Amino acid sequence: MTAQTGNAPRRHSLWKEIKRNRVAYAYISPFFILFLIFGLFPIVSGLYISFFRWDGVGAMRWRGIDNYTRLFTDPTFIKALSNTFIIGIIAHIPILGGGLVLAHLLNGTYVKGQNLFRTIYFLPMVTSAVAITIVFSSMFGYNFGLINYFLGLLGLQRVDWLGGVGENIKTAIIIMFSWKWIGWNMVIYLAGMQGISNDIFEAATIDGARPSQVFFRITLPLLKPIILFTLIQSSIGMMSLYTEPVILTDQMGGTRNMGLTVMMYLLNKAPRGNNIYGLASAAAYVITIIVIIISLLLNRAFHERSHLEREEKRRRGRKRRYA
Amino acid sequence: MRYLPLLLVALALLGLAWLSRRSRLVSQTLLYGFLGLLALTMLLPFFWMFVLSTHLTADIYTNPPPFWFGSNLAANYRAMNEAVNVGRSFFNSLLVATAHTSLVLLFCSMGGYAFSVYDFPGKRTLFAIVLATMMIPGIAGIIPWFFLITKLGWINNFLALIIPGAANAFGIFWMRQYCQNNVPVSLMEAAKIDGCPEWRIFFRVVAPILLPAYSALGIMQFVNVWNDFMVPMLVLRDANMRTLPIMLSYMRGDPTRGTNLGAMMLASTLTVLPLLIAFLSASKYFMSGLTAGAIKE
């Protein structure tokens, strides 16, 4: 109503602007409505629930930060946390480094048939995690598995991937995970490299730069924002790792919980089975906070380095001018 | 003494690196050898899955393991159908994935189009919010989310898989990128002057331009939903409602029958193969759409 009174011409025009663009608001409204209902509301009430003791049906009882202290005194949770970190950090090496190297090799004109290679490396991405985990678990078999058979051909010792005291479960998960995700990162980096002007690559090649030099001096620095993006995305992916370990081992992560991840821990508390909703919600928030901290640290690290480089460049430029 | 082989391998690698600097032949051989070997590694699990689905469990547990197709596909097929209702699960997966993908394409293209072409108050803030939601992991709300679904009566209902993610931030961001590069504003204005209503402009003029973007985003979404395990596992209860991944995990954990590896591999193949074929036939389109969607800085 106020918008229509004449003594507020600015608001009046704003209202008119909004009215004129009502179609645009209608177009973006599905996202915001769905996000409010299925995104924001659960996230906020998740924090609320995490301070209560609740079995999902009865009354909720206030417990303060009890759930959080219970989490961090639970050796199983600590184990799940360390498992997730170990798997996450080690698996990033092949996914990130390998993805970058592959994207670099398949970008320019170094390789004939690049499209064939790109397609093959991307194939694992379209497969069901459950199906492929079932296949891998048979490949990881101790007596009749394919991998041990190949190891035998090479004259190496057989590895008890899933059994024993569970010491190799994490390695098995990492192998599977890298197999699946390396192609995805490769494609994202390829998309990023497409954004880099071809002139730069051509100029470098004409100047006689070797492929490795092009990679370290040109591609890598220019891809930084995209590397940051993939790092944050894959950190989120790592912290919510669930399907592969659950199918490869069992709900508890196999022998001595060696394959238990935080996500499995969370869903074991509730709603799959135990109905300890407050504790599960607290676990969800711990995971989220870890993800946020990782994202902030990564952001910071990437920012800092590019800043340093700028400094370095400026200093070098000045020296040359005075020389 | 134990590390002698490793040492030799390292020395050999160093030697090869030195040689490849000198000779183009060596470097090319190394390059293609590496790429080819990696390609084989990527393909091996698929091949192994296909091979095992034609063998009986007893034949699989032999040394050396079978490397070529056997003759027991029919027997595995029968065993699989006794254990689970594959046709039903296949239909469920297809239904959920199709419905979800259609909604995502509609909502995301509408949103991306609005953010790229219109100039409305609050646009920058709203778009910043869209981007910010991409950085919030959805895990934080998983417990209340589950309750919400229960309260809505969506347990055992496909709506729980179709509706919540129907307009996602990444899709809107991606569609906006594409619109900005490919949809000329002048075209819009011309259509508007001709008296074409806005929704008709969108469906008749804009949507056809967006086809490549639709195909790439559509494949991504379809694949995600088809393969999703965690959410269906939480939501779907009935045997009749199982999607393919849920059916597979049931087969794997089925305590009454023991594991029939051959039948399980066949079921896995049936889960993977449709997407594999679809992707391979559209891969040229998809790859170019994905890389041309251009994350340009």
Image (tube, rainbow, N blue to C red):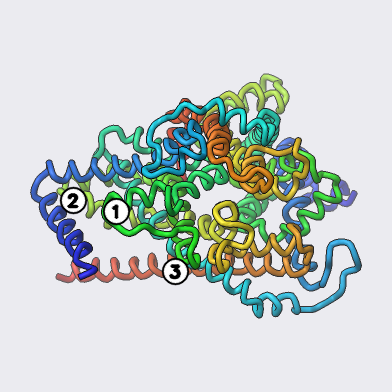
Give percent across and percent down for residue B247. Answer: 66, 40
Label drawn at residue A301: 3
Mark 3 closeness class: few <14, some 14–19, many ≥20 residues within 10 Å: few
Mark 1 falls within which chain?
A
Q: What is the spatial separation of the Cα atoms under label 1 and label 2, in whole angstroms?
A: 10 Å
Residue at (73% x, 35% y) in the render: A23
Q: What is the spatial separation of the Cα atoms under label 3 and label 2, in whole angstroms?
A: 28 Å
Mark 3 falls within which chain?
A
Q: Helix, strand, or loop for circle 1?
A: helix
Mark 2 closeness class: few <14, some 14–19, many ≥20 residues within 10 Å: some
Find residue A68 and report its image quarter: bottom right
Residue at (44% x, 54% y) in the render: A142
Q: Is residue B3 above or below residue A103?
A: below
Q: Nearer the viewer, residue A241 or B287?
A: A241
Q: Are marks 1 and 2 in contact (CB under 8 Å)?
A: yes
Closer to the N terminus: mark 3 or mark 2?
Answer: 2
Label drawn at residue A218: 1
